[in-house]
Image (cartoon, helix red, strand yellow):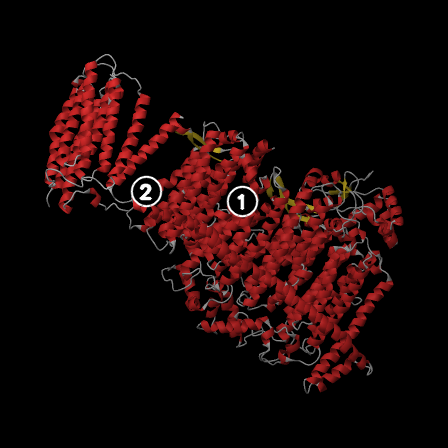
Amino acid sequence: MTALLLAIDDFNVAQNVAFGIIAFMMIVAALKVVTTNNVVHAALWLVLVLAGIAAQYILAAAEFVAISQVLVYIGAVMVLFLFGIMLTRAQIGKESGLNNKGWALGIPVALLLLGLMGYVIIDAYEDTVLPDRGPAPTEALSDQFLSIYLLPFIALSFVLLAAAIGAIVLARKD
Amino acid sequence: MLVVNFLLLAAVLFCIGVYGVIARRNAVLVLMSIELILNSVNLNLIAFSLMHGSVDGQVFALYVIAVAAAEVGVGLAMVLMIYRNRRSIALDELSEMKG
Amino acid sequence: MLAAEALELSSGWFLENAWLIGLIPAIGFFIIIGVGKHLPMKGAEVGLATMVSSLVLASGAAVQWVQRTDSADGHTEEAAGAISGFVRSLSPQAAEGGHASEPFIEPVVSTWVWWQNSGLEFGIGSSADGLAVILLWLVAFISLLVQIFSLDYVRGDRRYTHFFAALTLFSGGMLIMVMAENMVQLILGWEIMGLCSFLLIGHWWEDYDNSRAALKAFFTVRVGDVGLLVGTAILFFGSNQWAVDNLDSNGFDIAAIQAWALSGDPSATNWVLIAGAASLFIAAIGKSGQFPLHTWLPDAMAGPTPVSALLHSSTMVVAGVFLVARIYPVFWQGFNIDDGGLSFIAIIGGITIVIGALLAFVQDDVKKVLAYSTVSQLGYMMLALGTGAWLAAVFHIFTHAFFKSALFLSAGSISHSGSHHSFDMKTDMGGLRKFMPVTFTVWIVSTLALTGVFPFAGFWSKDEIIDNVGDHGYTFLFWVGLAGAALTAMYMTRATYLIFFGEPRGAAAGELHGDEEHSEEFEMETLTVGANINAPAVSTPVPAGYADGDHDGVTDGLTGGVGSAGDEPHGGSSHAAGEDGSDHHEGPHESGPHESGPLILVPIVILAFFALFSGFTNATPLGEDWERVKTYVEPRPVEVPIDQYLASGPGESLRLVVPNAEEDEGQGEEAGEAEHGKVGCGYDVPEPGTACFFPAVTHAEPTINKIFLSLGVVAVAYAIAIAFNVAYYGRKNKHLNGLTQRSRPLRAGYLFLENKYYLDYLYENVIVHAIAHPIAKGAYWFNQHVLDATVDQVGETTKKTGIWVYENIDQKVIDGAVDGSGHVASETGHALQPTQSGKVSQYGALLFGAAAVFAIVLVIVNVS
Amino acid sequence: METLTDQNWLLTVGVFLPLVGVLVMMFIPRNEESTQKLVGIVTAGATLAVGVFTLSAFDYGRSEDLQFFVDAEWIPVINSNYTIGLDGISLPLYILSMAVTFLVMVYSWDNMPDAGNPKAFFILMLILQTGMAGTFVAQDLILFFVFFELVLLPMYFMIGVWGGENRRYASLKFFLYTMFGSAFMLVAFIVLYYNTGASSFGFAHLVEAGAFIDRDVQIWIFAGMFLGFAIKVPMFPFHTWLPDAHTQAPTQGSVILAAILLKLGTYGFVRIALPMLPEGAKAWAPVLGILAVIGIIYGALGCLAQTDMKRLIAFSSVAHMGFVMLGISTLTTFGINAALFGMFAHGLITGMLFFVAGSIKHRYHTLQINKLSGLLVQAPHLGWILGFAAMASLGLPGLAGFWGEFPVILSAYNPGFGLSEVLFRTLMVIAAIGTVLAASYLLWLYQRTAFGEPSAEFSNASSEGGVAHSLSSAANEHDDHDEIYDVTPIEWIAWTPFLVAILVLGVYPQLLFKVIDPAVTALVSQLGETLG
């Protein structure tokens, strides 16, 4: 993290500081998500991560995405998760055996990936500065959706429909 | 500010997600880890869209969000069914895929 | 220096279209196969027609060739100061020298492009020269007679049509080979004959022995053919360049090969010539039944008798001799026959003479006696070729064809009507001369011819061979030749005695009990009868359907019903039907031995006639004018200017070359100094720009004492043999009880002096016992148990090796390796199975880990 | 070598017409079998007609040039074009493939394998036809490879679905073996492509540029191609798939396999490996020659050991392809000419032998040689045809086989471009001995199957068979397997062209040599430019 903080350049200090704080919070939360022994807590930590992501979106001048992130994830997905947790009778509170026997295997793999990606990213975007633009207008986004991305848009809606139906079919009692 | 920040953050989240997928036993937790991964990808998309000054990245991010939602829905439904069938959602007990 | 004026030389339609002679039978074959069954005579008439037309064409060609030669010589006498002309007619000595001055008579060649390769075009067609013409006529003639003979002999046979088809194609193959203009065509005819011999020897293939014999014949000859292929290759690549450059021809062209071999060209190295000659001679050994490979000949007797007659007289077996005679220059140079050294061919020939003759002593089957006699006669031909007596060899082919086919056919006639299809002289013959006078006469005439008694054909040819062998300095082989003559006389006497004299035995006496084990037909009979048990109806033509499907079902349906009991009872149905002898001559069951019908007698009488007189076509002792064969057949060893040789095409009128006078004188002198005039073609390199096509072979002047020597030998041999046979079999009869009275008058008839009896006793116990039993039996044992056994063993071993290789190497090693790789794959699969735990997490770990690793590799690759 | 482009639609039509038939066949309901057969045969017939027209349109005066030449853009990304053309080398095989497919289909009219389902069967054969014809006309490596592999799949299914008891093993072996080879071949192609400047996959360009690759690289590329082609041929150590495939395949499969598929390998050698990699070819020629001769002797020995007729014929084609490869390995016009003739002749003869074997199996339900006997008694025509084919196969002059055998042996006497004469002359002698072995095993087979008396278990069937056969030719009732009937009209129709071709080519080989020779001469002279 400190590396990040040190990498901050002179202008837009506020932005950088905000990013740093949020990022730190997110990472901690994410770690809790994958390490905690309480399923409900994990869900709540995940909320925090998702919120942080939304905040980063705002920092990256993408309000619409940020908003939909909040709505969809925190509003919908998390509710789903919690429902799922309850419906599967996970007891509230500590629970043992949430991890595999081979959980340690994950660490080297993760670190491997991290090192790899870190190297690549730094190698590629050593000091590419993000342009300091104003927030992208939402109508531009909508134009995109309704012009060239129209077909995927419709397809996506069908995907959602299918997912809804599929979920119902799967989750029905009989 | 630097694009590297966003990208590294995304990378970190991604790796945590991967660790979660590998380490976790509970299906719901695995799904959560997958959410982590998806969000890190989204973060990348947003960062690049900012960097290139085009909204396409945001468009794709929105798609990913939508798909993620659908995925979570279906995934949880499956988890429910599994639980209904075998009173447990411990993934390592599901080994029909054993070769 | 060859200031040779070109002279018109008569050609002719027959010579230019000689290719028809070979083509017609080939076409006839397909006609017979195609529609033969539906013709009134079951296709026989087609075969006869083709043979007649071939004979007519061949005769025409012969006549025109004679005219051609005469025109040439006539021109010569006018043109070239008549040296050759007069001298030839004056004294034989001068003729030797003058021979070189006789004009070269170019063969009439007419070819078409047959195939091309690497830009060279190879032809097929006919090349008519003396050798070709005489053999064309001979083959056509003998084939015609044999087919006439077969009309009666194999009537009612199950595969009558096929028989004639194969017979026709057989002659066709020989004719194609004889007229061959290039080596490939020669191979074509050669192999066609091999195929037909396979078909004909195995004609009654229901019997395992017959098909085995056919297989053996084809296979043995095929072994020789390796030599033919290799030799052709060697000669082709040896001579091709020279031929293309000088004769604008190619290395397959026989004329080109001849000229190249004598050209002294650097490409014609000794090695190439020896290798080529040796390989080709292997082929000749296989085909002509020379010493190591002769074992298939007696087995070939499994075929019907006409086949044996054709096979052993004029076609198949002389093919090897013809091959050697055809490209004689190669052998001449390769084995350097000229310098009187002991040549390979001569040795093989000599050995074959003795081996064959000795084997003939211990045969009971008359056809086998004749087969071995053929072997030894072929030995004579090879001996002659090996010692440079080219003319004598060819002449012996000519005469031998007549009397040998006569002998075979009369043997067939005997078994046909005399001994009820048995060929066993000991058990089924004897005393037949009373019943079959004509056959008897024919047999005697041809026997005398074969043994070389004075006026008969064999005398002139065999005596000339022996003369030349001695004259060319091969003293030892000269005596071998004489010994062979003596042996021939002896075994032929034995055969004659057993068949025609003494008392009728077995079938000859009209009895018909289990004596036919020795006759291949009866094996057929028992076999087919046995097989008829399978077939529901025996005596109705239905078994025809069984017998050979619809091929000869028709044949049997017709002739089977009308078939005669006299027919050879292969074709079980025909024999079964024959029991109720509805027939043109009554079967032997009713009356014992009797004379054969006209269709059988006419051919053998004609052949006997030729056996009597054909010798006079080249009666050397009677002077030059009798040497027709020499004049017309033997190529002239003249150096021909190549440009004039090339100037002549097939159709147009041909030109020839006369060496001018001074060269003749020159040669004449040299001839005076060098004995036998060892100059000219074959001895020294031809002038630049000229080519030789034939070496200057020398001819022995007939000396009266040699003639008497050989005649004496034969006479003595006869005396010994007759005496021995009578006494020997007489004695045997005496031991067999009660036969003495019948055999004593016979003996008395031949021993007109009492005291000679003890002499015979001496001969019998000492000499002939010594020859007939230990040596000949030993030779025969060697033949059966060593040579023959080797052939079989080789076959067996090859088969065994095949099985071993297949089972051990192919299936285990190589195939095993393949399967092994499969096993390895599945094993590794099992080894990896634990990773397939079905645990999502592990899958995930593997997935991401692998992705990471690959990515790292990618990065490293890109960075470096 | 210039190219003639007039009437260049011919080849495209000839190659892809069968696929039209496939489309039509798709819409035929499954139970209308005769319609399906009819459509298949008509399509193959039409294709053959196009082929015959191609024959007539071919300019024999210039058979060394590529005719009916098409060069259209196909996959620009890798510079691979749709380049097709026909010259003297490919013309005979092109026509042969069409004729054989047609006749095989005619044969299938009433000789369907037991698995039935003619629809799929005929569709597969039509696809096969496209692949084979395409391989012979392709003038672009990628195109060649596509067709070359396209052949593989239908044959795999043919063996795997319609084959004998052991078909799965055989088909898989065939498939894996050939795929294995093809993989190396593809690698070799690509390496060749990059080594020649990656500018085009066209044969012409590769032949131009291939000569300049340095020797070692050429040797390695040739090694790759060698694996691919040698397995297809098949040459000695790679031959083990052949007996199984042949034994298990249905008659139609065996015939096509023997007649055409094996030729793809040798054709590849002549068309691709030799001209594109002269140095490599020269370096490999001794190996090719030795393996070929081993194959000759080895195949013959294998034949002598067989008890199953089809397996024997399969091994015999190992031996015969050995002759072809020997001819190719001499790198002389003489040898390659003979090899091409040998390919054609072997296609006809061995195809014929497999036809006969199939019909015998159809009648006797066994191919065990020791059980078969007296074929000439029970089915004379069949027996004589078998004899005819056997005689042709052992290289009897006057029949087609001779011209693929004798000149090869001849050509080995002096190989081209300074190859070791001692080695090749030894090979020549061994090969000549191989002809004797060929005679021995074929005649042995013939003696045991055709001669003699019918064995007991069939002879009673034949007693009415002789009579019933005469009817059966009129009304062919083959379903009644209890009787041994003779050749049926359909079989006559399917076989006569083979027999006639074998005879005619044997009597007058110039028909074929006239077409091949100029092309081969051009090819070898082009080799000579680089090898000197």
Q: In this view, does C241 lie to the left or right of D277?
A: right
Residue situated in front as seen by the camera: C331 or C650: C331
Q: Could you tell me which quadrant the N terminus of chain A lies in?
A: top left
Asked whether the residues under marks 2 and 1 belong to the same chain, the reply is yes
Residue D178 seen in the figure:
yes
Mark 2 or 1 closer to N-term? 2
Instruction: Give percent across and percent down for residue D412.
Output: 60, 44
Rate crowding at label 2 as few (under 14), some (14 to 19) or many (20 or more) other CA atoms within 10 Å. Answer: some
Please tell me whether residue D246 is drawn above or below residue C709 in the rendered image: above
Residue situated in front as seen by the camera: C79 or A53: A53
Q: Which residue type carries mark 2?
A: Val
Which of the 4 quarters of the picture holds residue C473? bottom right
Q: Which residue type carries mark 1?
A: Met
User: Element type at marker 1?
Assistant: helix
Task: Quote the CA–CA distance across marks 2 and 1.
Answer: 40 Å
| Chain letter belonging to callout 1 | D
Kindly identify the residue that appears in the image at 44 percent across and 36 percent down: D187
Instruction: Give percent across and percent down for residue C608.
Output: 72, 67
| Chain letter belonging to callout 2 | D
Q: Is residue C682 left or right of residue C524?
A: right
Q: Name the residue under label 1.
A: D325
Which of the 4 quarters of the picture holds residue C400? bottom right
Please tell me whether residue C615 is drawn above or below residue D502 in the rendered image: below
Rate crowding at label 1 as few (under 14), some (14 to 19) or many (20 or more) other CA atoms within 10 Å. Answer: many
Q: Which residue lies furthest to the top in this view?
A: A11
Tag 2 and tag 1, C-beta contact below 8 Å:
no
> Which label belongs to residue D24?
2
Residue situated in front as seen by the camera: D149 or A157: A157
Residue C315 seen in the figure:
no
